[in-house]
Image (cartoon, grey):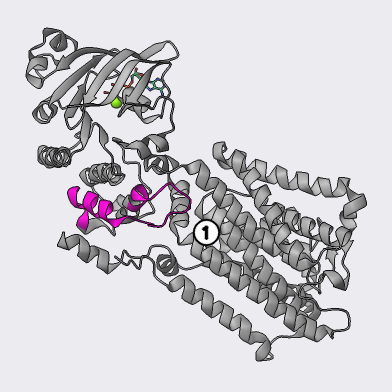
Amino acid sequence: MTQRRRSPASYIIFGSIVGVLALLPLLKLLPTSWYAPLIFANFFAIFAMSWDLLGGYAGQMNLGHALFIGVAAYTSGLVSVHLGWPPWFTIPLGACAAVIVGALIGIPAIRLRGPYLALVTLLALIAAYKLVLIYSDVTEGISGMSFSPRSFFPPLGYDVPLAQVKVITYYYSLGLMTLIGLALLWVARSRWGAIFEAIRENEAAVEAAGLNPAKFKVVAFMVSASAAGLAGAAYVHLPILPVLQPGGLDGVLSLDLSLSIIVASVVGGLGTIIGPLIGAYVMKLSEQYLSELPLHVDAFRFLEGQGWITLLFLVLLIVLVLFAPKGLLPAFLDRLLRRQAVDVEIREEGRKR
Amino acid sequence: MSVILETRQISKAFGGLQAVHNLSFRVQQGEITGLIGPNGAGKTTVFNLVMGTLKPDQGRIHFKDRDITGRKTYQIVDLGIARAFQIAQCCPGKTIFENLELCACSNRLFSRSKYPSAPILQAAEQAGLTSELEKLPGMLPQAGLRRLEIARAVATSPDLLLLDEPFAGLTSGEIGALSRMIQELRDQGMTIVLVDHNVRSVMRLVDRVLVMSFGQLIADGSPGKIVADPMVQQAYLGTDHV
Ligand SMILES: Nc1ncnc2c1ncn2[C@@H]1O[C@H](COP(=O)(O)OP(=O)(O)OP(=O)(O)O)[C@@H](O)[C@H]1O
Ligand SMILES: [Mg+2]
C-alpha cells in the first residue's frame, strides 16, 4: 500500500524560496553590499533549520548550537592552516567532529530535562570558547586565524575579481543550503522525525510504544550537529571571510550566534523546518536593512553598530513568545506543514475492512 | 496450556511501605486473568514491575520462559508485553492514526518497512476508531481516549496485554462495548491481565482471578470460587459488591 502521508506544502514553499533566491543575482536586483549578508543568511538558514530538528522537533532545548558550528569550523580551519590539507577534505572532517560532539552532548540529554539540559549545552559552548582562548598559540585566540587562497572553497584566489567571487560564493552557499535543507526536511518528515516529535510531546508514550527514546535523542543531536557542522566548516573556508574567530561579529563559537539562531527559529515557527528557514532570512535581511538605515536617514542614527539591532530582535522575541508562541507563520500555514491529513487511501482501506 | 508470565517472589517497597511482598503468580497463555484487590493493594505496582517501569527489590519475572527482570520498558514491549494506562499516554499533537503508527513502528534505526499498516488499521478497527483516525486525541470523549489507549497497546502487536482500570469512569453501555473488545482480543490469541474495581464486570469476563491485599496474593482461582471465598469477602468484596 502506498501512502502519501504528508502534504507536499513544505517542499513547495522550500522550492519557491530557493527559486526566488536563485533569481536575485540574475535579475540584477542585488546591490553589491547585499551579497555578503545574503551569503551569511544562507548559512544562517542552515543553522536555524538544523537547530529546529533538535529544538523544534525533538524538544531538546539547545542553547549552544554554535558549539557544533564552531567545533566543525575550528577542526576544519586548524587542519587546513596547520597541516595544509585541502578544504574538500577538511570540511567533511569538521562535520564529523561536530557529529562526535553532538553525540557527546546527546548522552547527558538522555537523562537531563528542560533547564538542566539547556544549562549543559550553554556550558559546553562556553567551555569550547575558553579552549580556543587557552590554546591561542594554535588558534590565535580572539583575534582569529587568517586563511590563504589555498584554503578557499569554492577555490577562488585573489586574482578573481571580487564581484565575481561574490556571485559564485552566493550560488555555492545557496546550493549548500538547498541540499542540507532538503535533507533536514526529509529527515523531519521521516519515521525519525515522527519519533522526535513524539519524544517532545510525551516521552513515556514513546517508551510504551516500544521505542528507545535515548537512542533517538542521541540520533537527533547527531543529525542536527552534522548539518550545522557541515555548514560551519564550509563557512570558514569562504573566500569572502578569511578570518576564523571564536567571538565577535563573525564568531563561530559565540553566544550571540546561538541566541540569534533560536530567535530566528522561534520567529519563524518551531517544528516546521520551513519556519526557521523563513525566520533566518527575515532576520538577516532586516538586520542588513536596519544597519544601512543610519546611512540614509538621520533619525535612525542610533541604530549604528550591531548592538541596537540585536537588542531589537531580542525584544521582538520576548513579545513573540508572549503573544504568538507558535511563531510568525500564520496558523493555516502551520496546518499545511505539520497537521497533514491522513491519506484518503488509508481511510478507504479502513472502511473496507 | 502454558504459562506466559510468571512472577517469582517479587517484592517492592517504597520507603517503609511494602507495596508488593513476596508475590508469586502465573498467567496462563490465552486466558483473561483478573487481578483485583482494594485500593493500594499493589496492583498498579505489579504492572509497573512487569513493564520495567520499576525494578523489583527481590524476585524474578519471567515472560515466555525468559527472565525479563530489570529490562527496560521498550525492550519488554518489544518482547511482546503492552500495557494500557488508565490515563491515556498519547502524543496530543499527533492524530489518532499517527499515535497508532508510532506504536507499530520499529525501534531499529534503519528499517525497511516504515509503518506496517495492518496492525494499525486492525487496532483502530477493533477499538472502533476507524472513522476518527484523523482526529487529535483531545477531540475524543473519555471513552474514546480509553479505547485509544488500548488501541495503542494493541498496535504494538503484543502477546500479553495489561489493562489497568479500563472500566473506570465509563457508562455501563461503554463497559459492555469495551468488554466485547477485550473478548475479541482474547479470541485472537492475546493473553490479557485485567485490573479493575468493577468486580461484577471483571468476573463476567475472566477465566481466572487473582486477589491481592497489602501486596500479597490472598486468593487465586475461578471466578465462582473466588466469590465464595470468605477470606476474599473479608478483605475486599464485602456484601454490597457482588
Ligand atoms: N511511586 C511510588 N512511590 C511511593 N509509593 C507508591 C508509589 N507507587 C505506589 N505507591 C504506594 O504503594 C501502594 C500500592 O499502590 P498501587 O498503586 O500499586 O495500588 P493499587 O492496587 O493499584 O491501588 P488502586 O486500586 O488505588 O489503583 C500504595 O500505598 C501506594 O501509595
Ligand atoms: Mg492502581
Q: List the residue tagged with mark 1.
A: A270
Residue A188 percent location from the top left of the image:
49, 60
Q: Residue at x 20, y 30 (%)?
A: B29
A50 to B5, vertically: above or below: below
- The location of residue B240, given as percent across then percent down, is 9, 18
> Could you tell me residue A147's position as x and y percent?
87, 67
The quadrant of the image that shows the N terminus of chain B is: top left
The residue shown at (42%, 63%) is A338
Residue plotted at (63% across, 61% down): A227
Q: Is residue B109 magenta?
A: yes
**Amino acid identity at mark 1:** Leu
Q: Quadrant of ligand 1?
A: top left
Vertical relation: A272 (above or below) B129: below
Image quadrant assignment for residue B65: top left
Q: Is residue B127 visible?
A: yes
Looking at this view, is A244 or A62 the one in front? A244
Q: Is residue B13 left or right of residue A169?
A: left
User: Magenta includes B242?
Assistant: no
The percent position of residue B142, horizontal first and vertical second, equals 23, 43
User: How many residues crowd mark 1 within 10 Å: few (<14), some (14–19), many (20+)?
Assistant: many
